[in-house]
Amino acid sequence: MSQLLDKIFLIFPNYCLGMSFSQFYQNYEFLSFCFSSPLSKWVCNVYNITYQTNYFSMSEPGVGRFLVALSLQGVVYIALLFVIELQCVHTLRRLLTSLGKRRKQLPLMEDAALLPEDRDVAEERKRVLECQPIIESMVGSPLVLQELSKVYSSGGNILAVDRLSLAVGKGECFGLLGFNGAGKTTTFKMLTCDESVTSGDAYIDGYSILRDIKKVQQRIGYCPQFDALLDHMTGRETLSMYARLRGIPEKYVCGCVENVLRSLLLEPHADKLVRSYSGGNKRKLSAAIALIGGPPVIFLDEPSTGMDPVARRLLWDAVTRTRESGKAIIITSHSMEECEALCTRLAVMVNGQFKCLGSPQHLKSKFGSGYTLLAKVHIEAELEDSDLQLFKDFIESTFPGSQLKDEHQGMVHYHLTDKTLTWAQVFGTLEAAKEKYQIEDYCVSQISLEQVFLSFAQFQHCTERGRK
Ligand SMILES: Nc1ncnc2c1ncn2[C@@H]1O[C@H](COP(=O)(O)OP(=O)(O)OP(=O)(O)O)[C@@H](O)[C@H]1O
């Protein structure tokens, strides 16, 4: 048994090293003893004590076989290190699994392809499919997605991202809006090479996320949805480390870190351990990591979640400055206010597909025609219903097609759908009716981005089953 284990353990470097020292010393002691006197030589013969005059002999207690094993291990383990570092196994596994899965996944994507597509989304797709990503990156679009798709196979096939095509230019902040589970984080994970791609490709600064993973990772800043920070480092140490990883020359690291700390109001916490940070401060640090060193493409996954209003505005300023310096930024957020403040273009994602795409103003004009009217009518306690009913009849007859969205304690919320109405007509009518219907206060505004977003809610529920 011990002889068998001795052979098996030869694959462990620490065993070989330990045994080499032990056997070498043992052999030295036996040699010294057996050659010390005729009596000791006789004892060695009687008790069959084996020793080797050549310390490096392959037989026991020579250390030759351990040295040979150690040399072989050196070659094998270095080869293994290269295989791991170059992600050969990952690539091989991806190739094998994609071959196996493709047959199952294609029908799922073909079914989804039957749905009609928004004109702006179709135009973007056409533009992207006709372009050469490498040339496109030189002329000003550091991020190009070409028919990027992801199907999760665990727990049944789920089409999480469905053939996204998009080009994001330098100095552009692109917003990915979507309901929970729409596929935003999966898109980010594929673009940062954290998740495998089922089909399609994406290019960052002209490098493919499938073939040039290392080059892609050198060119991106990523603020993940859940903070991935090292608890035992301070904020300043963390930022210095990322600054060095991004290749900032040593003499500029300190200044660069100070700037980011100051811009996000993290200075008072800079020398505290990350594990003692509050949730909001951890978020600030994650966003700071993504922004430091100004990589050409920056991904921010719900960066302002948990931040107080002051911190949120500081983050917006930092993101805007970074965008204006010519970087491409992709952001996801559930705050419409944030999207309006930051995004030059945005898309609403439903079940892995873009349902609309364009600037915030374009989307509001396209999907939110008409006006929002909020009015507060003074009502007497006993005449509550009749007072309000008179006002509602007036609105519905004056602005045909108006839709009552909400009604509460004399407060009414209408969507005036008539596209031909002008601001002057709406204000004129309400001013004239103010006294007659005892309107205490009213507000007329353009349709908000939130209302545009909500108008896609029906698609999310209709097609949820179709994803599986
Ligand atoms: N590892 C996984 N295995 C299987 N399915 C997954 C996995 N990760 C995500 N999904 C599924 O993929 C779909 C998209 O998920 P994703 O996390 O990308 O959505 P999201 O838009 O980022 O949502 P949220 O706004 O809640 O962050 C969901 O249906 C989700 O259940």
Image (tube, grey):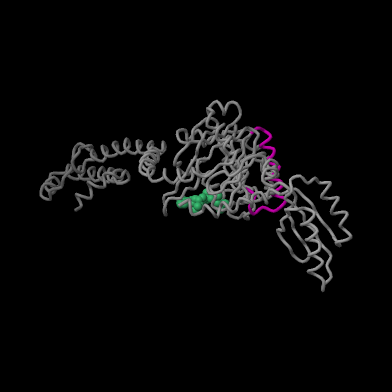
| Residue 148 included in the magenta stretch of the image | no
Q: Position of residue 194 (x, y in %)?
A: 48, 43
Q: What stretch is highlighted in magenta?
A: 303-326
Q: Tell me the residue at 55%/33% (across/down).
A: 126
Q: Measured along the vertical axis of the image, is residue 391 above or below residue 354?
A: below
Q: Which residue is drawn at 57% across and 33% down?
A: 247
Q: In this view, does 347 lie to the left or right of 372?
A: left
Please tell me whether residue 426 is drawn above or below residue 96 in the rendered image: below
Q: Is residue 45 left or right of residue 384?
A: left
Task: State yes or no: residue 309 in magenta.
Answer: yes
Q: Which of 147 and 281 is in front in this view?
A: 147
Instruction: Kindly tell me whether residue 463 is visible in this rendering.
Output: yes
Q: Where is residue 114 in the image (x, y as percent from the top left)?
A: 49, 43
**How many numbered badges does the structure rendering display?**
0
Q: Position of residue 138 (x, y in %)?
A: 58, 26
Residue lying at the far bottom of the rendered structure = 382
> From the viewer's perspective, is 75 left or right of 344?
left
Which secondary structure class fits the magenta region best? helix
Residue 267 visible? no
Image quadrant in which you'd find residue 76: top left
- Which of 112/79 is in front? 112
Identify whether 133 is placed above or below 182.
above
Query: Toward the viewer: 36 or 110?
Result: 110
Q: Camera-side residue: 257 or 348? A: 348
Q: Residue 268: percent from the left, percent from the top?
A: 69, 50
